[in-house]
Amino acid sequence: MLGTRAEIHLEALSENFKNMRAFLPQDVKIASVVKANAYGHDLKTVANHLVTCGTDYLAVATLREALVIRKSQKSIPILVMGYTPLEEFESAVEASVTLTIFDLESAKLLNQLAEERKVIQKIHVKIDTGFNRLGYKDMAKAQLEIMRMKTYPAIEIEGLFTHLALRSQASDEKQMALFEDLVKSLSEKGVEIPYIHALDSIGSIVYTETPYNLVRLGASLYGYCSRPVPFELKPVMILKTNVSRVAALKVGESISYDSQFVAESPMIVATLPIGYADGFPRQLSSGGAVLINGQRAPILGVMCMDQCMVDVTHIESVKTGSEVILFGTKEMPLTEVARWAKTNRNECLSRISSRVIRDIINQGKVIATIDYLLD
């Protein structure tokens, strides 16, 4: 297929999951994080595939994401890790979606709704140990309210969790100590919670001695970790496009808005049908590069909403239709593109927009094409 598209390689996803599964202790469960359209890879495709891989849980940021998954996956546990408004609780109970809770009011309402439907509603309680985003910050209050929640007949406190800032080992250990004190205090009060979790992909690699019994794997499943990993992680997404025009540029001619790039010598310039509206970072203007015919072509001038221009003067045989790799291969790694854009890899992946077609590839063949604008 020609045009801008993201290739989603399911074999790489399978291998990353398998390697992480083998790396973790066998009694540790995996919650695969598929928020933000599965980091841009396509929520439904990735969620369904991870279920076939054997994930124990799926984790998302919002209830809407959970409800999309529930349409095709009727039994897999799904955790909403973010805040859910009270007005949406009824939908969560009806779909059997596990919610993150950090106040007694929410637990009371969930209990009421679950009792009315004669079901048990599972929750995970979030503890703020220093990330300062969501969760109980007062540990004494957390303990008292969790003990109160345990008395609610239609509520099951299935999980207790926190999130590490990963600033340093010392700060992580401080957070873990706060969390561990609460876990022990609850246990001493007779409150045993099935799933205790604190680690994401990075934490799972770094803190192998304290994984608790559930980990939340996100970036590692998609091929990335910012810490050394004792096995190869394979990028699942390769972002590609094709040249739409090749033209000569004379000395003194400029490119794009504000004429920020002016040719100092004769050049050959290729136009690409991808821009910041597709999720390709505008910060790459006059600083990034793409790969054409195995060579890097610098981005020239200001990136447009829908297009960008690159220097192909030094590259032979570039023509309309020539394939362009934007990131996801060894020759054009996402790590480098993210550095040029002064951001991280997760943002680069998750910002790939709905305008970009996803080609789902398995065993070297395109098995599905997802076009959000036409579907």
Image (cartoon, helix red, strand yellow):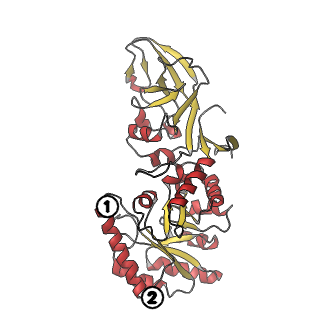
Q: Is residue 214 above or below residue 338?
A: below
Q: Residues within 10 Å of mark 2 (few under 14, many from 20)?
A: few
In this view of the protein, can residue 273 be seen by the observer? no
* Snapshot quadrant of residue 176: bottom left
Residue at 55% across / 81% down in the picture? Answer: 155
Q: Amino acid at mark 1?
A: Gln
Residue at 42% across / 63% down in the picture? Answer: 208
Residue at 48% across / 35% down in the picture? Answer: 332
In this view of the protein, can residue 27 be seen by the observer? yes
* Snapshot quadrant of residue 335: top left
Q: Which residue in the structure is indicated by mark 1?
A: 169
- Which of marks 1 and 2 precedes in the sequence? 1
Q: Nearer the viewer, residue 256 or 285?
A: 285
For the residues labelled 2 and 1, the Cα–Cα distance comes to 31 Å
Q: Residues within 10 Å of mark 1 (few under 14, many from 20)?
A: few
As helix, strand or loop, the secondary structure at mark 1 comes to: helix
| Rendering coords of residue 180 (x, y %) | 37, 75
Q: Amino acid at mark 2?
A: Gly
Q: Nearer the viewer, residue 121 or 1?
A: 1
| Rendering coords of residue 33 (x, y %) | 53, 59
Residue at 52% across / 26% down in the picture? Answer: 294
| Rendering coords of residue 284 (x, y %) | 42, 34
Q: Which residue in the structure is indicated by mark 2?
A: 190
Q: Is residue 244 above or below residue 119?
A: above
As helix, strand or loop, the secondary structure at mark 2 comes to: loop
Q: Is residue 328 above or below residue 346?
A: above
| Rendering coords of residue 254 (x, y %) | 42, 18
Q: Which quarter of the image is occupied by the N terminus?
A: top right
Left or right: residue 305 versus residue 144 is: right
Q: Is residue 85 above or below residue 304?
A: below
